[in-house]
Image (spheres, grey):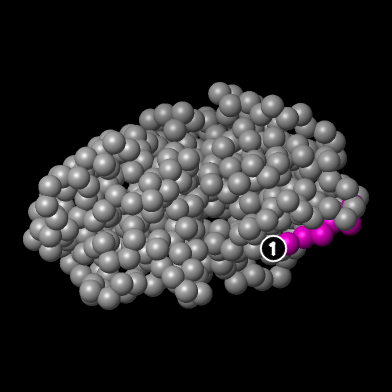
Amino acid sequence: MFTTPRGLRLHIGIFGRRNVGKSSVLNALLNQTVSIVSDVAGTTTDPVEKVMEFKPIGPVVFIDTAGIDDVGALGQARVQQTMKVIDRTELALLVTDAWLDYERQLLTLLRARNIPVVIAANKADVRSGTELEDAARGDCEHVVTTDALSRKGLDDLRRAIIGAAPPEFLAKQTIVGGLVKPGDLVVLVTPIDLEAPKGRLILPQVQVLRDVLDHHGYALVVKESELAEALARLKEPPVLVVTDSQAFEQVSRIVPPEIPLTSFSILFARFKGDLTRLADGAAAIENLRSGDKVLIAEACTHHPVKDDIGREKIPRWLQKYTGCNLDFTIVAGRDWPEDLSGYKLIVHCAACVFNRQEMITRIEKARAAGIPVTNYGMAISYMHGIFERAMQPFTELRPTGEQGRTCRIA
């Protein structure tokens, strides 16, 4: 449970005004002291995360946040951090002791993001009547009366969280779902370069391998240098070959055209993002002109090495493919420009360390700004002239964009 990557956990954000009992509710739900509790308003300053197993949903991350009514320059900085948590929240727990404009505005914001909400009408021991509950139920389906200190209503709150959870977390959305059946053989091509963690595979490779096994399939893991010999030894061809995007061109020359081929990054475009929109973003590479600004975004904050994929290879390939002198901005982790209007294209990594909500939020922000967005695997396959082949396994979601040039980039 504790080794489940955070990007695969349901993210439950806990929001509300200062001193309404957010941290007390979290501590009561987890039956342990995770967040500091006091009578002083604004005790929680930075978001506090806690992972746990929440049956029947499975692994989750609770995120305790600072009060949305914090004041002063430092308080406003805390509120901004709280607002950023909404970008990765998949279920919101709104804790309150009164139904005010703060609650109504926050509920409106969460609903605009299509985030399910559970309201904990807290401090029942010091309130009289049901005015709070009645007002909240007029705006929200899931309202539970709680008193975190006496633990009143905690079982009802757990049931409400389970009832409001997005269906995909109960249905267990998968990476290779619809592509791999029990007994199928999948070949995973995993180059070992300088950025691969010592003694381990990188996270997308590990997650795809595990997902193939969960589908009762067989997985053959091989480096690109041994791929041809490995395929020659097989009695039957694999149903799918998945490669690291950086080796796309070499692997596409080795794998016969009748064998479906894609990349880890493109699998994650479907699993963590919007496959069709990211595919259309790849076609927008054709529209780049000299001087255009391109945003390269990575979810993780790894230490870059020589010929780093995001900082060196993709910018070099984009400029060679387009023949244009482009202006690149590189961001990592949760850094993200507030204003996207100056960019002509966003190229994002596979987002293996993000949850799906955070990636979808970024895609929606780009859409709202009118900026095409794609991901590493799609951009690389497009520029190497193998985009159509890389997308062929996903026949249920054909891209609406058309591939342009078919040149290959060395």
**Location of residue 374 with respect to 49 vertically, above or below:** above
**Location of residue 7 with respect to 242 vertically, above or below:** below
Q: Position of residue 116 (x, y in %)?
A: 36, 41
Mark 1, residue position:
330
Viewer-closest of 50 and 69: 69
**Location of residue 378 with respect to 148 vertically, above or below:** above
Which residue is rendered at x = 79% and y = 43% of the image?
A: 285
Q: Residues within 10 Å of mark 1 (few under 14, many from 20)?
A: some
Give the mark count.
1
Asked whether 327 falls inside the magenta stretch, the response is: yes
Which residue is rendered at x = 64% and y = 70% of the image?
A: 304
Asked whether 46 falls inside the magenta stretch, the response is: no
User: In the figure, is residue 365 to the left or right of 118?
Assistant: right
User: In the figure, is residue 221 to the left or right of 346?
Assistant: left
In the image, what residue type sits under mark 1?
A: Ile
Viewer-closest of 389 and 182: 389
Q: Secondary structure at mark 1?
A: strand
Mark yes or no: residue 27 visible. yes
Which residue is rendered at x = 26% and y = 38% of the image?
A: 137
Q: Position of residue 156 (x, y in %)?
A: 15, 45
* Magenta residues, start to end: 324-330
Q: Position of residue 406 (x, y in %)?
A: 83, 36
Q: Position of residue 146 (x, y in %)?
A: 16, 52
